[in-house]
Image: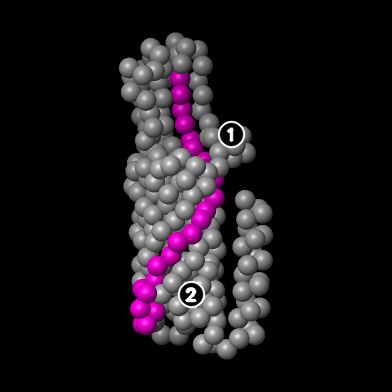
Amino acid sequence: MMRNLILLFIFASTAYSLHSQQSTNQGRLTLNVKYGLAYSFFVEYEQAPEDVPPGFIAFYNKKRIGNIGGIGLSYSFNEQNGIGVYYERQVHVGRKSFNGMASGANLSIKDFKLRHTNNFFGLDYHRNLFSSNELSFNVGVYLLFPEQQEISLFDNFIDIGERNNKNSNLMEGGVTLGFKYLKDLPGNFRLGVETKAFYTASLVEFETISVTPVLAYDF
């Protein structure tokens, strides 16, 4: 992840240097901040009781609707085309309760929150669709580093932990497709909304669909 943050910094520095050498109608560096809702297709993966050994209990599922927020930098080459880099963090929570026998002992779990977190590092291309430059289409690629908190119980073994890239080599790659609408505000600010679909190519499945308000600042 540190390498991706370094790449983000290098891109920002390069884009700012290019921006300072060009007039405002030739290039524009934009900071984008977003926060909104996300629907995940991969946070409910508990197996049915008939598909697991007798006595096996698992707490994996989280709510499909969660939150997503992020920050990105984009550079417009002209009035229509540009590229950008971003980091987005998506969080889904599942509240778990249990009271009974498990692994030969009385087990009590009360309103315990399990989290599923997706860390997206991406690069995208955007193109304005109309002369007003308010609506744009974007397509890109991303690396995904998930963090999956889980509880499982079987025989005399209780496993409570988080699977991630560091301990389980969890990493996926995919592509994005989205639309963004931004309206000018006083100063250099713009406000709007973005919708984006994340398709994880390594799993051949859609990962997430997000809808987020966006605040943009043009340098």
Quadrant for the C terminus in the image? bottom right
Q: Is residue 130 visible?
A: yes
Q: Main secondary structure of the magenta part?
A: strand
Eye-nearest disc, 1 or 2: 2
Q: Is 105 left or right of 50, judged from the image as shown?
A: right
Q: Nearer the viewer, residue 66 or 124?
A: 124
Which comes before the other along the chain, label 1 or label 2? Answer: 2
Q: Residue at x 39, y 32 (%)?
A: 45
Q: Is 28 left or right of 64, judged from the image as shown?
A: right
Q: Amino acid at mark 1?
A: Ser
Task: Check disc 2 and report its element: helix, strand or loop.
Answer: strand
* Residue picked out by circle 1: 168
Q: Is 161 left or right of 209, judged from the image as shown?
A: right
* Residue picked out by circle 2: 81
Where residue 5 sits: x, y (%)? 63, 58
Q: Amino acid at mark 2?
A: Asn
Figure check: 13 above or below 174: below
Where residue 9 sits: x, y (%)? 64, 65
Q: Residue at x 49, y 37 (%)?
A: 148
Where residue 211 sits: x, y (%)? 35, 59
Where residue 65 sits: x, y (%)? 34, 47
Is 134 inside the magenta-drawn segment?
yes
Q: Is residue 111 visible?
A: no
Q: CA distance from mark 1 to mark 2?
A: 39 Å
Q: Nearer the viewer, residue 130 or 37?
A: 130
Q: Residue at x 45, y 20 (%)?
A: 153
Is 62 inside the magenta-drawn segment?
no
Q: Residues within 10 Å of mark 2 (few under 14, many from 20)?
A: some
Figure check: 143 above or below 215: above
> What range is drawn magenta here?
129-153
